[in-house]
Amino acid sequence: MTTSFIDVDVRPVLRAGGEPFSQIMQALEILEPGQGIRLFATFKPIPLFGVMASKGFSHDILELEDGEWQIEFSPLPDATGETTAGPASESNAAWPRPVLELDNRDLDPPEPMVRVLQAVENVRTGEVVSALLPREPMFLFPELTKRGHQWRGGLETDGTTYRILVRADTAKGRPA
């Protein structure tokens, strides 16, 4: 089966100094089953590759003229795109109460992600940090996974706040 693509050109936004991530995520929301995104950018968006993989997409890269890029994100077979739980996460009942709660809703990127990562690195093994964020933290998920932390999250009932719970990695050897 051939994948059809929706074109998303974020070059004008990037040239104006803007952040196109929400535009890319909005395009994801309107995809039909089997559709992909053909992204045009002024740089190779390496952090986006992990985000899109977590959403169930592979990527093909083509360098265009003048250092610009075309990336085709194709859906993986049988991919669900779920990002509600990190690796080896267990039921909510098995998680301890958060030892730290952060409200990062009024911060500009990348500060919310930086604050969550710093907080998790400063708690003991197995302890949980809770954070309120202004959107789903797509760039945070691969960082947490890479560092061995467990996480779960979702939109709050207000529909505009994302709450994430992160349990500090137990393999780091920090005191329990």
Image (cartoon, helix red, strand yellow):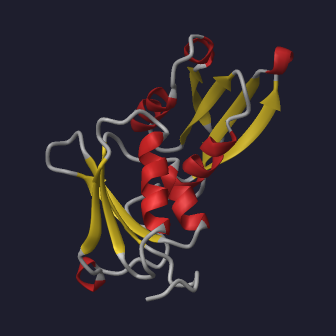
| Image-quadrant location for residue 69 | top right
> Is 100 placed above or below 25 here?
below
- Residue at coordinates 43% horizontally, 51% vertically from top-left? 115
| Image-quadrant location for residue 59 | top right
Q: Where residue 63 sits in the image (x, y, percent)? A: 83, 27
Q: Where residue 80 sits in the image (x, y, percent)? A: 46, 58
| Total residue callouts | 0
Return the residue nearer the eye: 149 or 98.
98
Outermost residue to the left: 157
| Image-quadrant location for residue 145 | bottom right
Return the residue nearer the eye: 140 or 118.
118
Would residue 77 appear left or right of 169 to someone viewing this image?
A: right
> Is 93 placed above or below 146 here?
below
Q: Where residue 125 sits in the image (x, y, percent)? A: 45, 82
> Is 15 placed above or below 27 here?
above
**Quadrant including the N terminus:** top right
> Is 53 placed above or below 149 here?
above
Would residue 33 appear left or right of 65 to someone viewing this image?
A: left
**Quadrant including the C terminus:** bottom left
- Residue at coordinates 48% horizontally, 87% vertically from top-left? 175
- Residue at coordinates 35% horizontally, 41% vertically from top-left? 135
